Image (spheres, rainbow, N blue to C red):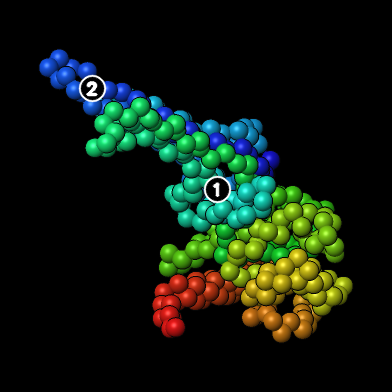
């Protein structure tokens, strides 16, 4: 089972309370206050784990609580801080507050940590409140309550290339032929029920990741078929491969329909760079003219046959070069210094 959305309750640990204590030792007739501070409560932290590809673990347990901090003690001893609770989540997990919808953060790199609930601060012991005019304070702070909130986890797979096409457009066959992925391939619609990822290896130690999502049909942006449920998984991709069967009755109409659905779902998604890929070329007669469509926004058009292994090398090289180009542009934007502030 593939799970790409979960809502859980997280509770950070409460801080320990401060201690009211006074020094009592033989030979020290006027011992002062020596109550220690309480320990800090543990945080609840999400950690990006590249080995995970689903939020399934959060389906079976919905409540998570970190350890509270110990109370302060005499002799100026601070209570131990509570242990933080670390929860593993897949790369691409987006975290929002389930009540307000506010964005909390996202996990994009392996090992990246995101604190989703902060532990309460420990209370101050009476030693803290000692002054020249109040040398025996009997005051101590209670520990601060740890954060408690409902958070929504949404998985958006991270890939370089996203495959877009109607059911049985040949996306899964293509993914299986160019990577080690093993998606289900059959001759009926909606064979692909969940997204699949595949790593493509090229010569020169080059590689990139392809995401295949269930087929898009007309009305997908309104929830028809499986498209709406999984379109989010190609939002992070650097380029798209819009796949149209070469033997389609009207390739232009099929291409236009796919782009329309992307646009209705998200203008940003539709604006992503894309190539048009005509699949199943082995089904065409040898003398069939080249298939093309009017696609002014596409950076290239390819014709392939995954079964006959035709045209794959040119397509993979094109996808690699374009994804690499986008990566370089992203790095350049990150390195670009901010303009100096001027009053």
Residue 101, horizontal then vertical, whole percent? 66, 53
At x 53%, y 45%, the residue is 116
Give SS at disc 2.
loop
Q: Is residue 238 above or below residue 61?
A: below
Quadrant into which the C terminus falls: bottom left
Residue 196, horizontal then vertical, whole percent? 64, 53
Q: Which residue is mark 1?
A: 90
Q: Relative to 187, is 195 on the left or the right?
A: left
At x 15%, y 20%, the residue is 28
Q: Is residue 337 above or below residue 199?
A: below
Q: Is residue 196 above or below residue 285?
A: above
> Badge 2: few (under 14), some or many (20 or more) residues near its Cα, within 10 Å?
some
Q: Which of the pair 311/297 is nearer the observer? A: 297
Residue 243, horizontal then vertical, whole percent? 72, 68
> Badge 1: few (under 14), some or many (20 or more) residues near its Cα, within 10 Å?
many
- Is mark 2 in CB contact (under 8 Å) with mark 1? no
Furthest-right residue in view?
A: 249
Q: Which of the pair 23/152 is nearer the observer? A: 23
Q: In the drawing, what numbered circle is on residue 208? A: none
Furthest-left residue in view?
A: 27
Q: Is residue 184 visible in the rendered structure shown here?
A: yes
Q: Which of the pair 291/24 is nearer the observer? A: 24
Residue 289, horizontal then vertical, whole percent? 78, 82
């Amino acid at each position: 089972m593939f799970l790409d959305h979960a809502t859980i309750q997280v509770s950070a640990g409460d801080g320990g309370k401060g201690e009211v204590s006074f020094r009592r030792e033989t030979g020290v007739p006027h011992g002062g206050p020596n109550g220690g501070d309480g320990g800090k409560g543990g945080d609840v932290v999400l950690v990006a784990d590249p080995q995970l590809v689903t939020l399934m673990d959060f389906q079976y347990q919905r409540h998570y609580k970190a350890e509270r901090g110990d109370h302060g003690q005499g002799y100026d001893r601070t209570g131990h801080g509570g242990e933080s609770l670390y929860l593993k989540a897949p790369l691409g997990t987006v975290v929002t507050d389930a009540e307000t919808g506010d964005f909390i953060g996202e996990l994009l790199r392996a090992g990246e940590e995101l604190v989703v609930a902060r532990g309460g601060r420990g209370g101050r012991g009476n030693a803290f409140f000692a002054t020249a005019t109040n040398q025996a304070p009997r005051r101590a702070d209670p520990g601060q309550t740890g954060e408690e909130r409902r958070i929504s986890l949404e998985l958006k797979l991270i890939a370089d290339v996203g495959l877009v096409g109607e059911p049985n457009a040949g996306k899964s066959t293509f993914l299986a032929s160019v990577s080690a992925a093993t998606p289900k391939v059959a001759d009926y619609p909606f064979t692909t029920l969940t997204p699949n990822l595949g790593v493509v290896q090229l010569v020169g130690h080059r590689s990139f990741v392809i995401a295949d999502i269930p087929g898009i049909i007309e009305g997908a942006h309104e929830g028809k078929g499986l498209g709406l449920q999984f379109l989010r998984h190609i939002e992070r991709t650097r380029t798209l491969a819009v796949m149209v069967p070469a033997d389609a009755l009207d390739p232009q109409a099929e291409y236009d329909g796919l782009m329309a659905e992307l646009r209705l779902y998200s203008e940003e998604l539709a604006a992503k760079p894309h190539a048009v890929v005509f699949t199943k070329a082995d089904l065409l007669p040898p003398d069939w003219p080249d298939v093309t469509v009017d696609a002014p926004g596409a950076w290239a058009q390819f014709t392939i046959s995954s079964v006959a292994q035709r045209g794959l090398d040119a397509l993979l090289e094109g996808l690699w070069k374009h994804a690499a180009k986008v990566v370089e542009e992203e790095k350049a934007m990150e390195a670009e210094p901010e303009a100096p502030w001027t009053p």
